Amino acid sequence: MITFLVFSDWANPSQTIIEKTDGTHMHVTVLIRTAEKYRVQLEEPLGDLKKGAKLMIDRSDIAAEPDYTQEGHEWVAWVFHHRWYFAGACFLGVLAMSLGWFDRDELAEWMDQTWDFSKSIIPLLFGGVLVTGFVGTLIPERIVARWVGGDSFTSNLVASMIGGMWYFATLTEIPILEALLGLGMGRGPALALLLAGPALSLPSIAVIYSVIGFKKTLTFVVLTVIMSTCAGMVFGWFFV
């Protein structure tokens, strides 16, 4: 079951070469895909545009978009393009082991528990996708870049503090972070927010305060924010 999840969620290490209908070739990373437009970030300078510039492209203007795989990552890209074969083999293995190891009552209980769990998290997942749409549309890119762009101490600290105040329901933090990364959030601040968010929130801080008091709650909150900030900075140094 673990290897099924690994292969089904295998990421593509390749960047994209966009060939436009006017003959322009662009080496980009695709941040957001919609039915009509691509939001991309340049990986190489293009004319007056510098590396890292973000722009929108109409899908009707794209003639082709072949992958560009960095040297040494070819096997990762090969696994990505064949991931469903590996995931399917793992699924069949789980199915065979389940039929061989469990009786009918145990399988029925397993499916009942799975269905109950799915009903509890799927609405939250759709809620996260809905919030992502608002985040990506309503928050200006310049504000995201100003406060949580790059990998400075300030941007990581702001991300940790936002994560400490923001309530993240299960599975909603991932689509929200994806939208913020598309708007220019740094990778270090993204990790800092992801670490502080599930650990803290205003409701949880209030409950902790009622149990252990002000000083211990303050210590816990400050340590969580500081350690998330440091982890984000270290991560940003190695994964720009």
Image: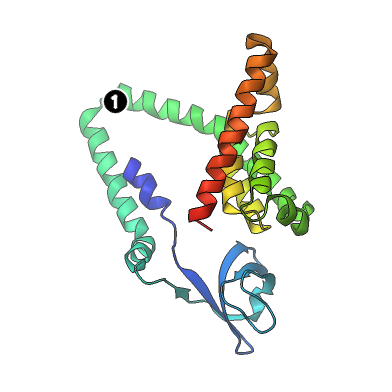
- Residue 225, quarter of the rendered image: top right
In the rendering, at what x and y percent does residue 99 appear? 24, 34
Inspect the image, locate mark 1, and give the three-letter code of the amino acid beneath it: Arg
Residue shown at the point (74%, 49%) measured from the top left? 134
Q: Secondary structure at mark 1?
A: helix
Image quarter in which the C terminus is found: bottom right
- Residue 20, quarter of the rendered image: bottom right
Q: Is residue 115 above or below residue 143?
A: above
Question: According to the image, what is the colour scheme of the structure?
Answer: rainbow
Residue 34 in sight from this viewpoint:
yes
In the rendering, at what x and y percent does residue 9 appear? 43, 51
Q: Is residue 21 above or below residue 176?
A: below
Residue shown at the point (76%, 55%) measured from the top left? 137
Apparent side of residue 218 relative to residue 19 in the rendered image (left or right): right
Q: Residue furthest left?
A: 100
Q: Residue furthest front?
A: 153
The residue that mark 1 highlights is 104
In the rendering, at what x and y percent does residue 120 appear? 56, 29
Residue shown at the point (64%, 56%) measured from the top left? 150
Q: Is residue 31 above or below residue 139?
A: below
In the rendering, at what x and y percent does residue 45 appear? 61, 79
Residue shown at the point (65%, 75%) measured from the top left? 50
Apparent side of residue 187 relative to residue 76 in the rendered image (left or right): right
Apparent side of residue 112 relative to residue 132 in the rendered image (left or right): left
Residue 172 in sight from this viewpoint:
no
Q: Nearer the viewer, residue 46 or 221?
A: 221
